[in-house]
Amino acid sequence: MSKSFSSIEEAFAWFLENVYKNLPADEKKGELVSAWRSFTFNQGISQKRMISILERYGFDVKILVTYKR
């Protein structure tokens, strides 16, 4: 299955809803639960941290920036 997202935040929200919640309890500890809390309660999570987690769970993250004059 292939899915594309328009932002890191959109991909991370999808990850939390579709991957994270189905992980075994012992895997939802430490960094992952901290990232979930930070994202869910708008406490601040960096894109770098989100990308690191997404890549660890099989996401291929590429950032595209386009400038049109």
Image (cartoon, rainbow, N blue to C red):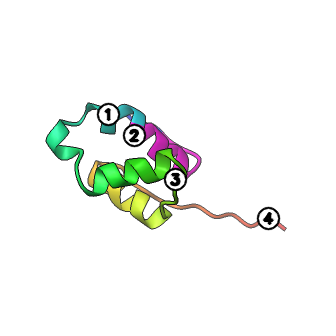
Q: Which mark is residue 1?
A: none
Whether tag 1 and tag 3 are in contact, CB under 8 A, the answer is no
Is 11 left or right of 35, judged from the image as shown?
right
Left or right of 48 on screen, residue 5 = right
Q: Position of residue 35 (x, y in %)?
A: 38, 54
Which region of the structure is painted magenta? 4-16
Which amino acid does the dot numbered 4 rest on?
Lys
Label 4: which residue? 68
Q: Amino acid at mark 1?
A: Lys
Residue beneath label 1, please? 21
**Quick check: is 66 in the magenta stretch?**
no
Q: Nearer the viewer, mark 2 or mark 4?
A: 2
Circle 3: residue type? Ile
Q: First in sequence: mark 3 or mark 2?
A: 3
Instruction: Name the residue that disc number 2 marks.
Output: 16
Quarter-of-image position of residue 14 = top left
| Cα separation between marks 3 and 4 | 22 Å
Image height check: is 12 above or below 63?
A: above
Earlier residue among tags 1 and 3: 3
Q: Residue at the spot x=51%, y=47% of the render?
A: 41
- Say what secondary structure mark 2 lies in: helix
Residue 69 in the image: state x and y as whole percent.
85, 68
Q: Earlier in the sequence, mark 2 or mark 4?
A: 2
**Based on the displayed image, in which of its 4 quarters is residue 22 positioned?**
top left
Task: Judge the density around disc 3: few (<14), some (14-19), many (≥20) Cα neighbours within 10 Å.
Answer: some
Q: Amino acid at mark 2?
A: Leu
Q: Earlier in the sequence, mark 1 or mark 2?
A: 2
Foreground mark, 3 or 2, reads 2
Label 1 vs 4, first from the N-terminus? 1
